[in-house]
Image: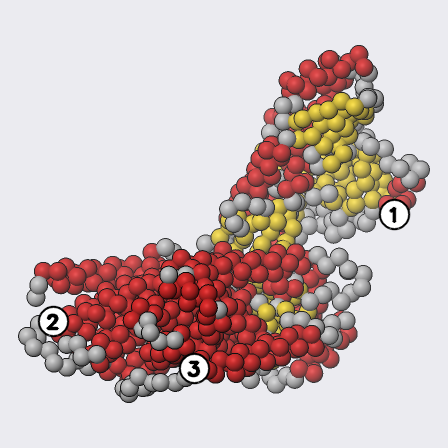
Amino acid sequence: MNIFKTEPTFKFLNKRYYAFGLSALIILAGVATYFVRGGFNMGIDFSGGTMVEVGFNRHVEISDLRMALVPTGMGDAQITRIGGEQKFFIKTMNVSDQAMKSETMDDHEVVARKIENALMSPEEKAQTAAGKIDLNNTAIGEIASFLRSKGLPDTDCQEAAQQIIDARKTGTGIIADLALLEARGLKHKVMSVLRESAFLGKYTMLSVEIVGPQVGKDLQKKATMACIGALIGMLLYIAFRFQFLYGLSGILTLAHDVLISLAFILFFNIEMSLQTIAAILTIVGYSINDTIVIFDRLRDNLKTMKKDNLEAILDKTLNQTLGRTIFTSFTVLLTVLSLFLFAGEVIRPFAFTMLVGVISGSYSTIYQSCGWLQVWEKSFLKRKKR
Amino acid sequence: MNKSLTWKIGLVVAVIVLSIVMLVPPKDKINLGLDLKGGMHLILQVQTEQAVAIQTDNNVNQLRNTFKEGSIKFDKVLRKAHNRIEISGTQYDDERKIRDILDDDYRDWTYSFGGNLISLTLRPNIENQLRDQAVEQALETIRNRVDEFGVAEPTIQREGLSGDKLLVDLPGVDNPDRVKSLIKSTAMLEFKEVVAGPFLNEEAALTQYKGVLPEDLMLVKANPRRMDKGVYVMKLASVVTGKDLKRAHRTQDEYGAPAVGFSFNNQGADKFYRFTSASIGKLMAIVLDDRAESVATIQDAISNDGIIHGRFTVQEVDDIVLVLKSGALPAPLKYLEERTIGPSLGADSIRKGLLAAIGGLVLVVFFMLLYYRGAGINSVLALILNMLILMGIMAYFKATLSMPGIAGIILSIGMAVDANVLIFERIREELAAGKSPKSAIDAGFKKAFITIFDSNLTTVISAVFLFQFGTGPIKGFAVTLIIGIVASMFTAIFVSRVIFDLTYGRRKKLTRISI
């Protein structure tokens, strides 16, 4: 099979102003969104703060959660449902208590504890107060030592604790019924202890992340430096392998991809985190590949097509390499799509950014990289002929 | 079959066997990251400035003593900053003597005389050395504590090569509070003489001294969990400290309540005996991390051992014993970052990651076969080998597989076949230009090589920047991506070629190839 039975003869270059226009439009819309929203949706990696991931074994609305959080002064927390499941991210950037302006880690910890406290129902609180343990929210070691304190033999305790954790690992992460544990083969004396002095919470804390404000600032700086560093790295390498103007065109193309990705991150209010930066850096490294393929061919063509004008040479080059530009990006797109669809909410911001970046990358390779070369046609050709 | 093909096949087989050996059994060889198996991740900062300040304080005490012994008159010796000491009120006649002392015994300091004020500043290289030592010592202490606590396969290391940050990864731990207080406890144990107290609050304590506390005294709050609330006025200088301890263990007090038992080493016992025998009837406090744990009247001269009692639970006693045993931290720690991942979240991520990997692989294989037919099979074989090598190398380097790492592997499926695409397209082009299949394959591999090399290198460059900037899981992503790309250079260029040679090499007359 072949996309193009014979070499295509598209005239790419004469449409380059439309392409520049379209890109400028998207980027400007991104800038506008930036100011309307007042900046990026910063994840706690960058802003510092507390993020809790919590799962329930019943249907819960975001508004229910917000209602529960209001009395603790965290009604303005950002709550998002994960997929279509009964799982939520609860994120707060600042410690809402006015008295705790200093925002140390300990304050954020208090926030995390407050959130958990707000999520507990009155009966769960009562049972905890009565000295019972919540099998859905207790760590393996704690469960084991709790059982030991009830006078059970050590091996039974460890085995039972492991079984309880394993039971949580399947399905929603919440054990709905003690009978489920019995089915896993827990001993009768263990079960009777559990029936008497343990209960099953209706929620489970899947993860708790707390990042101090200082880390975030460091990371913002480092992320910017890494992106700029990578761009300069590309410029130097291409300038070394080809010529400076190729390098310049290459990184302008990359800067375009980065800006388009950032614009879409803004449009869809995707969270800026370590992951998103990782995606952007990967795009920087990957989307230059197609450009290099084209520049490589261009170098050959400039030798053989001395009589043609630059636009014709560029068009010819683009057409010759069009098949592989599209298909190489397509294979990566397939894997990114699979990530986006199947790999879950944790990695979705990464997959989304990659998705945008890969598409933008192959579009920009065609319309931008050579477009830029033509912009400085005069000096470019002069150097070429020498 | 010619000779060079034989050794090429040999090499490929060797790589396959080696990768499998590295990888078997996968459950033991592939290290899962905290985000996949659950656990606690901490970033801590050692307050190295305080470690320097403690050292400076020691020097201040030493200076005072030396001056007293040498009968050099002075008004005050004070620490003015964490690395600066000021001596005031010295006599002009003593200058020679003082200079001699400073030159001989305080080589780590630079000093300057200004009027009757002498200021000493710690040399920057010494200060850096002290800071570095503090971080190393903190690392060691935390490692001891974590080992005592019993966490399997913890990671405790400096974040970056230098700097004051420590990374602590504790797999399987998801009860942050206890572990954190264990790690964070500076475990500065001091026995101090109580001058007055308890007072209701700090203001009440200060009224005794008209609001200004003399320099040799300090205020210490009672730990409200152990004893009644209150503030005590104590001597700044400790009688003995945790350094003078030989042993700590769990014991019971006379009422059978849990208590911390301890015994002194020779030096400690000596100091303690001298103090207690001279202070019978006075109050003495046991202070842990600047909180009074217990205050008692000295009944007898004590030398060897004693107990700390208060309202402890058994667990609290065990934790205090543990931190006393593992030694004091050289400086307080500050938490910068804390992530706790429960066990069920990790299991869910693994399931989804696996699904995405299979999805990506199936899609790529399908389209490669559809688009390149016979040559597609070639690239799929190369791709499978690529994955095998990638996992083998990760196992060899004991790299940690995190969720972003899985994403990196999935992504490298798509990127690895790029090299095949570039080669196959070039072969098609050569065929279209009328070359024979054999020379088309030859030319395809030869001409595509430099392009593949260039484009892969750029991806590696930016992955290196990513590695440099990222923390744990993101580093894992960068690593899998780099390994995947390097492996693809081998599989797509070398292995693919071998497969072509194997399929078409033996035919005498080759008129058509499936591509």
Q: Residue at x 53, y 62 (%)?
A: A227
The tag on residue B200 is: 1
Q: Nearer the viewer, residue B205 or B358?
A: B358
Quarter residue A60 falls in: bottom right
Quarter residue A95 falls in: bottom right
Up the image or down, A163 lies above or below B429; here it is above
Report the label total. 3
| Amino acid tagged 1 | Leu
Chain for numbered disc 3 = A
Q: Choose mark 3 or mark 2, whichever is in front.
A: 3
Q: Residue at x 73, y 13 (%)?
A: B96
Q: Choose mark 3 or mark 1, whichever is in front.
A: 3
Quarter residue B501 falls in: bottom left
Up the image or down, B500 lies above or below B145; here it is below
The tag on residue B505 is: 2
The tag on residue A12 is: 3
Is residue B200 in sight in this rendering?
yes
Question: For the residue carrying disc 2, how many other residues have a C-alpha within 10 Å: few (<14), some (14-19), or many (20+)?
Answer: some
Same subunit: marks 1 and 2:
yes
Question: For the residue carrying disc 3, how many other residues have a C-alpha within 10 Å: few (<14), some (14-19), or many (20+)?
Answer: some
